[in-house]
Amino acid sequence: MSYFSWLDYSESERNKVLDLVNALGDRDTRDELGIGTVRDAYADLLFPGTSTIQTRARYFLLVPWIYLTIERRLRSTKAAGKEDIAKRLRNEEVGLINYLAASDDPEGTIGIEARKTLKRLPSTAYWSGLSAWGIKLCHGSQDQYNHALHANGPPRPLTGRGSDDAIEADRQNWHPGLPPCPRGFPYADISFRLTGEEAGYLRERIMHNAPGTFLAFLADQGKSGSSAQFPWEHPQMCEVHGKIRKTIQHAQNFSETIHGAALLYNYLLAKASEQEDRIVEYTRKFTLWTELIQTRQETFCQWDREEFWDTALSMNPKIPSQTKLFVDTWFDLALNTDEPQQLLDHRQTENFIRGRERFLKRGQARLQNQRALELWGGAAGTGRLDYRWSTVRTLLADIQKAFTEEPADA
């Protein structure tokens, strides 16, 4: 039985795979045209430590509390194998589901449907983010953590006394400033409601470990209640300057421009499957997209595309050259024409999209494989890129809410 334990090679790569697994269940966010490396580079620049599989901010504390609880128990029991440690951790995480599901705000409870059969544990969703925010100090995967805990035993708590503390500090797995867990944890009622102390801690960790990012700006100065659909629509954008603003502008331009390629791809699928209602739908959506592009034509004319790529590559130097070629070609097609609406039934553009799908999917390309086409559900990767904003908005709302409400007991 595997609970994604095979993903040991890299925390960041591991998170990207899990994001992909999550996207496969959402037809609006699937990366059908292979631009995920660019999207993720900008998402990491704007909102480091976040992931589409995260749900609530307090998991950034619940997970380390569970791990610290197991470490504490192992100090008073004989050494366990790494499989036993993994089993104990899993049992505690699964046990948390019942308490969270019974709380007055169960939204975002990971495993609320699966319960004991849950495969993707909260720790899996938050492992990389805990490192990025400086809450988890140990390196490596969860399996490597379990192995080290078995081989070396749990770190001794720091007492502030004795010369061994300096040595022991290097072995600590978790940030020493982590707020204490609620009394009786994990065998007590628990919720997603952060206390003021906990929210302050998360804000401090973000600002310390992700300075100069939009996430840090919003954690520090963000006002609660924003319902903006995209980060660039946030009402405080007028307060954002310098490098952060530039990064957001590049992200917005890419999101809006590449959306046309996704709509065109689905239009071609609708034509190939002879679904008249879908043809009408995607013709309308593509028309709306062209109107947006024309409205922002001046911005796109001034867009520094070389800087756009330099920024993306600074986060991920391994963006494939074929991806860069595809994106640049689409930019040229979409932005260097007076009538982008003509792209809808343009033979060269159609062949361009067909070629990209064939390059990515080979024999499973929908536009050349009838069986694959029949499995098309009417929408494939049609959502505009928001760079995890829908998730980030919830995480920030949890933190901001704690500063305006009475602190919780659990």
Image (cartoon, rainbow, N blue to C red):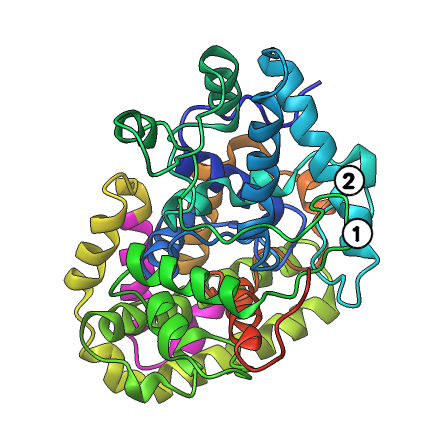
Q: Position of residue 77 (x, y in %)?
A: 63, 16
Question: At x 73% / y 63%, what residue is drawn?
Answer: 107
Judging from the image, what secondary structure is the residue with disc 2 in?
Answer: helix
The disc label shown at residue 99, or none: 1
Q: Position of residue 390 (x, y in %)?
A: 55, 67
- Can residue 234 be seen here? The reply is yes
The disc label shown at residue 95, or none: 2
The disc label shown at residue 7, or none: none
Q: Which residues are magenta?
A: 324-345
> In this rendering, is residue 103 above or below 54?
below
Question: At x 77% / y 44%, what residue is drawn?
Answer: 187
Magenta region, main secondary structure: helix
Mark 2 Cα shell of 10 Å, populated few (<14), some (14-19), many (≥20): some
- Can residue 392 be seen here? The reply is no
- In this view, the residue in front, 153 or 206, is 153
Judging from the image, what secondary structure is the residue with disc 1 in?
Answer: helix
Q: Amino acid at mark 2?
A: Gly
Q: Position of residue 169 (x, y in %)?
A: 32, 32
Tags 2 and 1 touching, CB below 8 Å: yes
Q: Position of residue 206 (x, y in %)?
A: 37, 60
